[in-house]
Amino acid sequence: MGHIDPNRLGIVSAVMLTAWHGVWMVLVAAGVAQRVADFVLRMHAMKSEVVVEPFDAGMAALLLAGTALVGYVGGASSAALWNCLGAVCHREKASGGVGLSARA
């Protein structure tokens, strides 16, 4: 199990999540987000009274900042957990233990 840099995974996760929400904001600004939301709900066999509001630059900036933060924290936390579990597994294998996966 290789080591993952928490900062690097945090940045990658933040960029990907923010970019995805950036695309949504472009759809909202272009006035096509309502049709996209309706179509996505129909694909999932759902119907809801979701109403896409007009584009608001302040709310868009808040959304993008929030998703960047959540993406970074989620990615960095995932990498830290991965590294921690890898250290536990490596330590058990080195001591002759059966490893983490056999304990479940």
Image (cartoon, rainbow, N blue to C red):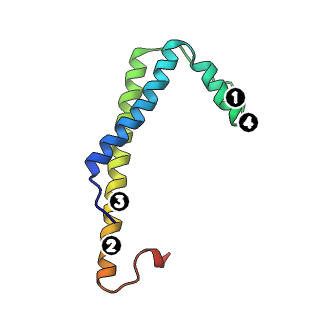
Assess disc 1: are there few (<14), some (14-19) or many (≥20) residues with their C-alpha within 10 Å of its C-alpha: few
Q: Which residue in the protein does label 2 denote? A: 88
- Disc 4 to disc 3, how far (Cα)? 36 Å
* Residue under the point 38% across and 25% down: 62
Q: Which residue in the protein does label 4 denote? A: 45
* Residue under the point 45% across and 74% down: 101
Q: Name the quadrant of the N terminus.
A: bottom left
Q: Amino acid at mark 1?
A: Ser
- Disc 3 to disc 2, how far (Cα)? 11 Å
- Disc 4 to disc 2: CB gap under 8 Å: no
Q: Amino acid at mark 2?
A: Val
* Mark positioned earlier in the residue sequence (1 or 3): 1
Instruction: Label 1: state its secondary structure.
Output: loop
* Mark positioned earlier in the residue sequence (3 or 2): 3
Q: Amino acid at mark 4?
A: Ala
Instruction: Label 2: state its secondary structure.
Output: helix
* Mark positioned earlier in the residue sequence (4 or 3): 4
* Residue 58, quarter of the rendered image: top left
Assess disc 4: are there few (<14), some (14-19) or many (≥20) residues with their C-alpha within 10 Å of its C-alpha: few
**In this view of the protein, which residue sits in the foreground, 4 or 85?**
4
- Disc 1 to disc 3, how far (Cα)? 37 Å
